[in-house]
Amino acid sequence: MKKITVVGTGYVGLVTGVALAEIGHHVVCLDKDVEKVELMCSGISPIYEAGLEGYLAHHLRTERLEFTTDPAVAIDGAELVFIAVGTPELADGSADLSYLREACMTVAEYLSGPATIVIKSTVPVGTNDLIEQLINEHALYPISVVSNPEFLREGQALYDTFQAERIVIGSENKATGELLQEVYAPLARPVFHTDRRSAELIKYASNAFLATKISFINEMAALCDQLGANVDDVAWGMGMDTRIGHSFLKAGAGYGGSCFPKDTKALVQIAKEVEHDFQLMKAVIDINDFQRHRILKWMKDHYTNMRGLRIAVLGLSFKPNTDDIREAPSLKLIEALIECGADVVAYDPAAIPNAKEVLAERICYAYSVEEAIEKADGCLIMTEWNEIKETPIEVYHYLMEHAVVFDGRNCYSLEDAKRAGVMYYSVGRNYASRRSGDGVKGKD
Ligand code: UDX
């Protein structure tokens, strides 16, 4: 058992803290947010993540997990300090390292002996070197810095931690890398050792590659619409080749969330700093932005005028099983619909409280799919929650004023939509309905 401090209790920090406690370590999590720390001390998770609260409450009882706002309590006596503070996007797309610098200075001030600093925050290449220099300039004891990027997905964070496909450890000396491997040993997951810079880049490269797959299939969807093919079948047929694989080939309204949009832009900046024009990444970002314009165009072409129309929006979070609306494509589309004069009624199984903070009274909120679509002139699907996918398509026909569904996540089959008499727009596969002449309108 090691005494570990985790600085920052956002998604990565809290999940890491809980997981380290679960595998037997004594963990103290430090955060500046008093309210959040009080919540966690009483066993309540400030983030929406299935299963997390159970582990949190359990390890408060085992006393292997503590939360504090006091750096002295958290850092004194720590053998390892994990830093998991945010690195938000600056106006030019680069990563803001101010929280990280502040966290490092705090660690340097309160360390009471030699320690290993583990950087989990996503940081530009070379940042770990700077951190090591910065802390060593201010700390009384020697410290080593290890890069240990995090690959967890929101909504599956515990699974991704306990069943991690790889634990990447970037260190400049063997002993430090091995010490971190020992910390993770109870997980019995594959470990990959490399140097710090490569570890930092693995994180960006992984997210950028997944984003590239999504933009690729979204671009294929645009082609499918023009060529009369079905993007779901194209993706499936491609994915059967194990060199390509099925994952991240779901065409839709585009990627959102706290990582892909931020990390793709940061990678363009990282490249720019070494005078490399990362054209592929710029195209990935542009294609992603374009997805919502495509969907808006369906709507503008369908309705000559949206003023006063009741438009139901199903799904606000950037993906299912989370309440996170950061960079959610739904938000920008809703803004565009408001601008067009539509009356928006939104429903999401989890994200309404967060959406209210951003959209406030500019739209109405419903508390079920049915309530949202009742008497609506159109329905826009932005997140493929099970609850939405499992709503029979006939329900739209029965409840809506005009059964027109713009599906940004391809939740329904074209056949079902046709059978139910719903006018159905979806991403990259509307050709089938057009050819069969059933009146379902295409994008063009
Ligand atoms: C991502 C990475 O998967 C994870 O490894 C990293 O640590 C953090 O960033 P997350 O942001 O939680 O995780 O979401 P993810 O499940 O990867 O989805 C990201 C976005 O891509 C979502 O908006 C999702 O709707 C979209 N997506 C995903 C698609 O549009 N099509 C797909 O095929 C897959």
Image (tube, helix red, strand yellow):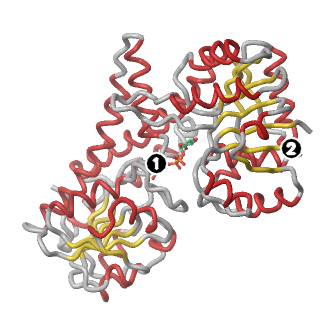
Residue 3 visible here: yes
Q: 401 and 145: which one is in front?
A: 145
Asked if the residue under mark 1 is in contact with the one under mark 2, i.e. CB atoms within 8 Å, the reply is no
Q: Which residue is mark 2?
A: 26
Identify the residue shown where x is 49% and y is 38%: 210
Disc 1 CB within 8 Å of nearest ligand 1 atom = yes
Residue 163 visible here: no
Q: Is 433 situated above or below 182?
A: below
Quadrant of res 310: bottom left
Q: In x, y percent, where is residue 169?
A: 72, 25
Q: Could you give the CA–CA distance between mark 2 and mark 1, rounded to whole angstroms?
A: 31 Å
Q: Amino acid at mark 1?
A: Gly
Q: Is 321 situated above or below 117?
A: below
Q: Residues within 10 Å of mark 2 (few under 14, many from 20)?
A: many
Identify the residue shown where x is 70% and y is 18%: 194
Q: 250 and 346: which one is in front?
A: 346
The quadrant of the image that shows the N terminus is top right
Q: Is 271 situated above or below 70?
A: above
Q: Is 317 situated above or below 132?
A: below
Q: Which residue is mark 1?
A: 257
Residue found at the far right of this picture = 1
